[in-house]
Image: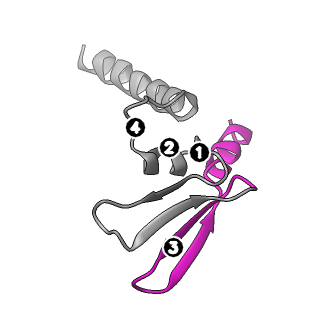
Amino acid sequence: MINKLAIAAFSLIAASSAASATSMLSEAASPIAKITQGHGKPGDTATSVSDPDVTFRVLDSGKVERTNKRFGTAAIVDPLAEFRTGRRNR
């Protein structure tokens, strides 16, 4: 019985995580969550509440630029790259 419950729980967790990665976000989601998960539009920006020096901006290419004014750093990431890679491996 425990084995059946463990298998059912594992199946449910695996299915729900894959479904949530491709589904629409709630309107209540934070602006940073929308941007970092690929739901932002070019030009959208958001500032971190916990660290106001960190900002996120959606570029024209759809990639996200994350800058930290305090440390003078910037990084550009593609929020959909992991999703695309995962889809090819299945």
Between the C-alphas of marks 2 and 1, the distance is: 6 Å
Between the C-alphas of marks 3 and 1, the distance is: 16 Å
- Residue annotated with mark 2: 34
Locate residue 31 relative to residue 85 in the image: left or right.
left
For label 3, the SS is strand
- Are the residues tagged 4 and 2 within 8 Å (C-beta)? yes
Mark 1 residue type? Gly
- Are the residues tagged 4 and 1 within 8 Å (C-beta)? no
- Are the residues tagged 3 and 1 within 8 Å (C-beta)? no
Identify the mark nearer the N-term, 3 or 1. Answer: 1
Mark 4 residue type? Ala
For label 1, the SS is loop
Mark 3 residue type? Thr
Point out residue 52 in the picture as x, y percentages from the top left corner: 34, 69
For label 2, the SS is helix
Between the C-alphas of marks 4 and 1, the distance is: 12 Å
Q: Nearer the viewer, residue 36 or 7?
A: 36
* Residue 29 tag number: 4
* Residue 67 tag number: 3
Mark 2 residue type? Lys
For label 4, the SS is loop
Q: Residue at x 57, y 52 (%)?
A: 44
Q: For the residue carrying disc 4, how many other residues have a C-alpha within 10 Å: few (<14), some (14-19), or many (20+)?
A: few
Q: Residue at x 63, y 43 (%)?
A: 83
Q: In this view, which residue lies farthest toward the bottom?
A: 71
Q: Residue at x 49, y 86 (%)?
A: 72
Identify the mark nearer the N-term, 3 or 4. Answer: 4
The residue stretch that appears in magenta: 61-90
